[in-house]
Amino acid sequence: MMPATATERGAPLLEIEDLRVAVRGRTELEVLRGLSLRIWPGETLAVVGESGCGKSITSLSVMGLLPEALQQIGGQLRFAGTILPTGDNAAMRKVRGRRIGMVFQEPMSALNPVIRIGDQVAEVILEHEDISRAAAMERVVELLAQVGLPDPARLAHEYPHRLSGGQRQRVVIAMALACRPELLIADEPTTALDVTVQAQIMRLLKQLQKDLGIAILLITHNLGLVAQTADRVAVMYAGRAVEEADTITLFSAPRHPYTQGLLRATPRPGGRREGQLPLVEIPGMVPSIRQLFPGCRFEPRCTHASAVCRSIDPPSHTEGATRVQCHHPISTLEALS
Amino acid sequence: MTPLLSVKDLHSSYVSSRGRVQAVRGVSFEIARGETLALVGESGCGKTTLARCILGLQKADSGEVTLNGTRLSGLSRRAMRPYRADMQCVFQDPYSSLNPRRRVEHLIREPLDVHGVGTPQERRKRVLELMERVGLRPDWASRFPHEFSGGQRQRIGIARALALNPKLIICDEPVSALDVSVQAQIVNLLYQLQRDLGVSYLFITHDLTLVENFADRVALMYLGQIVETGPAQEVWRNPQHAFTKTLIEAIPIPDPRLRRA
Amino acid sequence: MNKIASSIAPLLRNWTLCIGVVLLVIIFGMAISASWVFPHDPYDMVGPPLSWPGAYEGMWLGTDSLGRDIAAGIFHGARVSLLVGFVSAAVAVVVGAIVGALAGYYGGVVDTVLMRITELFQTIPQFMLAIVLIAVLGPSIETIIVALGAVSWPTVARLVRGEFLVLRERAFVLSCVVMGMSDMRIIFAQILPNALSVISVMSTILVATAILMESALSFLGFGDPNVITWGTMIGMGRDQLRDAWYIIAIPGGALLITALALNLVGEGLNDALNPWLKKREA
């Protein structure tokens, strides 16, 4: 299915515009350096990047849960047409859980070990809706069934340690979906799980998306997952979305040298290169936010770099179906070769 | 030619809160000189226990481990020490596998000190040579581990493992904590070292796609047993065991045109 | 030079540690200078008895019922308190660290045996055990140090064992085993330094406890009769509590300030070492 163009799709559900987040008190140290992203209702946007690129900070910003050491210094977050009051904790509490749900990486630590599963899920419902405890528990059993847990009525009375990692992640998903949010942020939801369990969880998320029409912001480092599940992809590098396109376009014709490097470095079945080094490396490493320089952050590792890359941070521009931030984007022909 | 490492019918169990757990249940395999055998399995399949048994960090219940013609099983910790130089290890977590209070130079020199290799000058020279070999700048020698990124720490770990010219290096998930671009650097480094030095690897991982790209043979481990062995590409193309099929089925392929429903 | 400065800077920002260290330095100064400031024996009668602080020329902290200079007692007593406190804590740390390290590293039978012995010591109330030991060995500075060391090592042993149980599974320790390093070298050169921050925080508390226990022993008359200590002074002032309470209050205050200073240092070290270590390992 080819995604429709922006104009056909109407208003985005979540719009991140020029988001800037920096170390509190040292605003020159930027973790997010003008990040712009849009998610439309019902779609899956994958945000991929390596550690330190700011992808998790992005999800925390949307939830208004930035750690104390960081502060938003610019930009705007709009959700369903209104500006998200990310600085106002009381106002954000009405959004969190109710309109935006979140699934974390560690299913072990996302659940309270001393509270029964049913009570934990019910807590979320009771926090946001004025219904009786009994009614909430009924909903809980429904939810647990919906996320594919066997014998949900009995499971609701169990403690988290009785469940496997995959089952726990299902409970976490049930909690995130308890109040039927419009957006689900899944931050590395399967990184702590085995591949076989990962496949089940991703299948579940896609099924729930189809049934409930929720949008998913999938944050991951795993390009395989992205290829298998996302409608659109944003590749982040050093606090910016350096490339954004629909999944097919991004994988078949990457425009940013970093995206290309990342795709080439990812091992793939049948990708054995006899007589050569097994994998294609991207030389060097991600720059520290302490390294301040005027140009493109990828320039030190880039094979396409020129003088302009060293002096000017490239602005975002559109090339066909792709939004890319690069002075020398790879041409479609070159990318296909 | 005799294999470098041979493991015969190894059994190992440990006591947990839920009673005795049979982690390794009769595992046998061999690794030839200069070969890479990838041991692939999911968490809890016993692959880490198996590695610990081979390294003598944990006692096996029964079975035999022979390295380079020497039977290691049954040797006491002390008796095993001289043979340890032949078999080194690279650990998963580059953050906890280096003593945070030691400088890089000291960390890489330590194995030489322990085995009394060469004079102090020779050791120092060897450290710089090793640093260069794994792609670390010699002027970083006096830094502490916390001053390095994950990939660089893994390079320090590899230099340390190489110091004694081992014949076998057991790599326990050496790249699973690293980013894709750095993972490629480390895998390539290991590959190059093997070509230059002829070292063998037992490469333990959960990532079948990764090892399909460079291992000679793959052994799939499931519930404490090796259920399938074969040339890496062959296993992928033509899986025999049900577990292998399930695993391959579940691996997300980084190509949206090959999307599974 | 710069490296040293940058590692000390965060310590200076830690005010609990600063105050604690300043107080300790003053008390150490008193102990060291005692022989010059008060060259006479603190047990000598040097003024009229029971003169209040400041009432008699040269006796600025007053005299006790036998006309002994309280200031001289405080200075000379600081020596004994610090000596007993630090040496007995050192004994406890060395013994406790060795026992805890062996138990934690080897586990199994070694652990069981060593921990049973440790528990044996812990089940007897510390103070009673100290009194019994001194009664058997006879009261002197050395026996008090031995007795106090003997009652406080179990706490150190348990703490060090706990640290070792965690650290021995860390990959850097495994990598040393794989390399063929000897157990003693792994225990003392690899693991122990990583447990030092916890041990050093613990030992400041041990020093404070030992100083208080020594005073209590002296107060009860189990102290070394040949030297003056703060506890002895408090004990001797007991009869004059109604009319000359300063005789007790002054050494009591000295004890309080010393214990406080040590606790501040412990607290400060805890704050200073822990985040620092976390940052290094992160």
Image: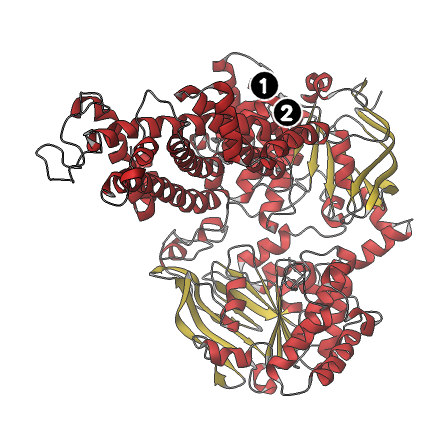
Left or right? Give the position of C281 relative to B215: left
Specify few, some or many for label 2: CA neighbours under 10 Å numbering under 14, 14-19, or 20 or more.
Answer: many
Quarter of image, res C8: top left
The residue at the point 76 percent across, 68 percent down is A203
What x and y, as percent, mark residue C278? 48, 45
> Is B160 drawn above or below residue C166 in the view shown?
above
Circles 2 and 1 on the same chain = no
Q: Chain of mark 1?
A: B
The quarter of the image holding the N terminus of chain A is bottom right
Q: Chain of mark 2?
A: C
Q: Are marks 2 and 1 in contact (CB under 8 Å)?
A: yes
Q: How far apart are labels 2 and 1 at the CA level?
A: 8 Å
Q: Is disc 1 placed on a helix, strand or loop?
A: helix
Q: State how many labels appear.
A: 2
Disc on res. C199: none
Q: Is residue B182 left or right of residue B30?
A: left
Compare residues A327 and A207 and report the one nearer the observer: A207
What's the amino acid at mark 1? Val
The residue under the point 65% across, 45% down is A279
For disc 2, the marked residue is C179
Label 2 amino acid? Met
Q: Quadrant of residue A207?
A: bottom right
Judge whether residue B107 can be spotted in this image: no
| Secondary element at tag 2 | helix
Where residue B173 sits: x, y (%)?
Answer: 68, 42
The C terminus of chain A lies in which quarter of the figure? bottom right
For residue C225, say whether it is visible. yes
In the picture as drawn, the residue positioned furthest to the top comes out as B119
A265 or B126, which is in the foreground?
B126
Query: Mark 1 highlights which residue?
Result: B114
